[in-house]
Image (cartoon, helix red, strand yellow):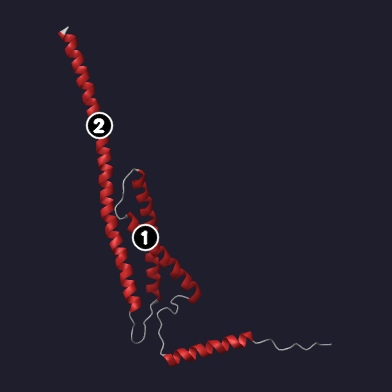
Amino acid sequence: MAHTAIRDAQRMVSRYAEDIADDMESWKVDHHAAMRCRDFEGRLIFLNGLIELFFDLRGKYEASSTPGVLRYDPSLEDQMEQALERLSSACRGLESRIRDFEKQGFAVDGADDFRSLRTNVETFLAEARRIRGIEGRMGLRGVTMNPEDSAAFRAMLDEHVEKSSMPAPPVSPTN
């Protein structure tokens, strides 16, 4: 009788130990996912800071005036556009990663800020493409003229518009 009781107790302990081991393994998976999410959050917050820095510097640059001749390097504009394209592509991948963590039930710190900044990046890139399509590579953004030159430029444009809107001379019928 004692032998049977010991054997039953041993089975119960063995099953209980297996259950604990299974629980420990499932806890490790959850813990590992939580730690990956936490690590991702830290990197995401750092990226948010870098993107904010870019927009702050861009705002300061656009608010400042440059005395003298503006040196234009077309390769720099191409490099900037390529860098923004790569950033946009990376942001799409990060957005997917954020959604994966959110599907697992995690609230990702910095995700809302990231989405707002990503929208700003996409808007900036779309505007740069639009302007490039209208004005060419550099465009006229940020160009300042003294009032006399501005008035002369405006008069030249008005004259061109007047010439193009004049009615065509009458065509004489030929016999």
Extreme-left residue of the structure: 2
Residue of label 1: 116
Which residue is rendered at x = 61% and y = 88% of the image? 163
Which residue is rendered at x = 53% and y = 89% of the image? 156
Q: How many marks?
A: 2
Q: Amino acid at mark 1?
A: Ser
Residue of label 2: 23
Instruction: Return the x and y of residue 134 as percentages of the image width and height.
Output: 50, 74
Look at the picture and state if 169 lies above or below 56.
Answer: below
Of discs 2 and 1, which sits in the foreground? 1
Q: Is residue 16 left or right of residue 160?
A: left
Q: Amino acid at mark 2?
A: Asp
Give the position of the N terminus as an image quadrant: top left
Q: Pick whichever of labels 2 and 1 is earlier in the sequence.
A: 2
Instruction: Return the x and y of residue 42 as percentages of the image width and height.
Output: 25, 54
Extreme-right residue of the structure: 175
Q: Secondary structure at mark 2?
A: helix
Say which quarter of the image contains residue 76: bottom left
Which residue is rendered at x = 29% and y = 67% of the image? 53
Q: Residues within 10 Å of mark 2 (few under 14, many from 20)?
A: few
Give the position of the C terminus as an image quadrant: bottom right
Say if mark 2 contacts mark 1, CB within 8 Å.
no
Which residue is rendered at x = 19% and y = 10% of the image? 4
